[in-house]
Image: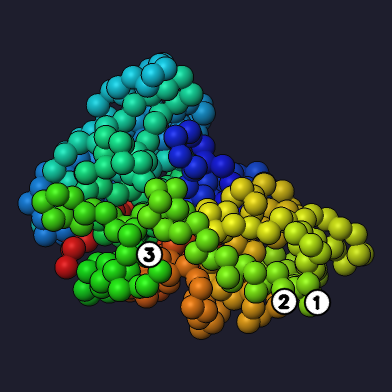
């Protein structure tokens, strides 16, 4: 599954995890190999929200995104009914209140999930602030200290539900915050789930990040009442001035030196082992050739933000050459496997994050997940290490708000 531009706008770079869901789903729709029976997914399916958080705060829930049948942006109520956003303004105007109350601690609530490519937000104790511009919905950007949601404890899951099935994930691409897990019930009655932390994993993550030298502790955001709100993803940390912009430079320099005299081989498609690309560094470029020796794409020496965000100098367009190579490089840089394995992608997590210069944020998230899977960065799906569940005939979806201890 590859990541591309998200289906609705925000004032920050889009979450590639969400975009991956939409694109993978779109590819399935277009594929003639998808059985016709899979088109029987109903207009809405049940979504059960379970509150095991241990917190007494009122929970507010939002289902927002793009209606797949029409391409319109909007929100859904508890019955799964779509409501388009009204026109926005410049400066942004307040969005209609799309919230509904979630379950109290120890309780559940079942709503209807519509065919959307979007998000389910949940917040504790306070409603989120959404606004509308002339280009669409403005979503929370908590790396911005002036964002109206900066002191609210909240999180979101990302999903796509269409005629080919349901894709739903737990994501940490933008931040690590209020813990939750997702699941889908399949026709035989069993449930596939992901996103649960190990016992003590929530505090374990923050303690580990706090003790990581090099500025990583600065990613943690705490409210004036002492509540830990979140840890920013490292790209947002660079944007906010919390993490040095050169935090990965030493590793990049070593990669550049190595592949000036050696070849980096990228085999981006697991089901197409004969499709290979060969990278060599020349000056400030890493040039990739195909098996015929023709140069197919080149990458400039990436900075840390490009690596953490898998964008800018590591842009991944929706094509069959540059995009697949870029996502492979992005995974290799974040997991620091490019120096230890000249054949990428390296899909065995045994060798991930072993260099002292690595994405420690993602490393520490994966270490605290019960199944080891997470979306610690945009292309964490390379090698299937992402926290995603999918089924072509979903009977029911689940979001569980997990304990904070």
| Left or right relative to 243: residue 299 | right
| Picture mark count | 3
Helix, strand or loop at disc 2?
A: helix
Q: Is residue 368 above or below residue 376?
A: below
Q: Which residue is mark 2?
A: 258
Residue 150 drawn at (x, y percent): 27, 42
- Which residue is at the far left? 56
* Label annotation for residue 335: none
Give the residue at x 48% y 33%.
9
- Res. 133 image quadrant: top left
Q: Which residue is mark 3?
A: 215
- Res. 73 image quadrant: top left
Mark 1–mark 3 Cα distance, whole angstroms, equals 33 Å
Q: Which residue is mark 1?
A: 261
| Left or right relative to 29: residue 67 | left
Give the residue at x 68% y 59%.
301
Mark 1–mark 2 Cα distance, whole angstroms, equals 6 Å
Query: Of residues 104 and 40, which is closer to you in this image?
Result: 104
In the picture, which quadrant includes the C terminus? bottom left
Circle nearer the N terminus (2, 3): 3
Q: Given this view, does label 2 or label 3 mark the residue nearer the observer? A: 3
């Amino acid at each position: 599954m590859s990541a591309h531009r998200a289906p609705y706008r925000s004032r920050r770079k889009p979450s590639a995890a969400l975009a991956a869901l939409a694109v993978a789903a779109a590819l399935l729709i277009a594929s003639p190999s998808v059985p016709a029976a899979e088109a029987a997914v109903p207009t809405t399916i049940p979504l059960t929200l379970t509150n095991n958080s241990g917190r007494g705060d009122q929970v507010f829930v939002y289902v927002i995104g793009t209606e797949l049948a029409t391409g319109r942006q909007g929100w859904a109520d508890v019955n799964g009914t779509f409501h388009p956003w009204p026109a926005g303004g410049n400066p942004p105007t307040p969005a209609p209140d799309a919230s509904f109350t979630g379950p109290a601690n120890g309780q559940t609530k079942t709503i209807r999930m519509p065919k959307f490519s979007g998000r389910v937000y949940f917040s504790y104790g306070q409603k989120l602030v959404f606004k509308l511009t002339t280009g669409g919905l403005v979503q929370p950007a908590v790396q911005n200290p002036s964002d109206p949601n900066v002191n609210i404890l909240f999180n979101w899951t990302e999903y796509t539900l269409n005629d080919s099935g349901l894709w739903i994930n737990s994501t940490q691409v933008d931040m690590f915050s209020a813990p939750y897990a997702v699941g889908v019930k399949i026709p035989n009655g069993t449930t596939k789930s992901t996103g649960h932390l190990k016992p003590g994993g929530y505090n374990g993550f923050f303690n580990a990040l706090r003790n990581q030298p090099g500025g990583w502790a600065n990613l943690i955001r705490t409210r004036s009442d002492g509540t830990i709100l979140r840890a920013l993803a490292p790209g947002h940390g660079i944007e906010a001035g919390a993490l040095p912009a050169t935090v990965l430079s030493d590793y990049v320099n070593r990669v550049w030196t190595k592949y000036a005299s050696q070849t980096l081989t990228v085999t981006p498609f697991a089901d197409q082992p004969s499709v290979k690309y060969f990278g060599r560094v020349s000056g400030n470029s890493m040039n990739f050739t195909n098996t015929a020796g023709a140069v197919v794409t080149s990458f400039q020496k990436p900075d840390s933000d490009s690596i953490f965000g898998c964008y800018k100098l590591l842009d991944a367009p929706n094509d069959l050459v540059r995009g697949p190579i870029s996502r492979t490089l992005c995974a290799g840089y974040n997991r620091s496997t490019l120096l230890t394995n000249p054949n990428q992608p390296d899909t065995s997590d045994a060798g991930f994050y072993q260099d002292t210069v690595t994405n420690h944020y993602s490393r520490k998230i994966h270490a605290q997940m019960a199944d080891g899977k997470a979306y610690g960065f945009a292309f964490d799906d390379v090698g299937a290490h992402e926290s995603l569940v999918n089924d072509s005939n979903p009977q029911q979806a689940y979001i569980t708000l997990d304990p904070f201890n």
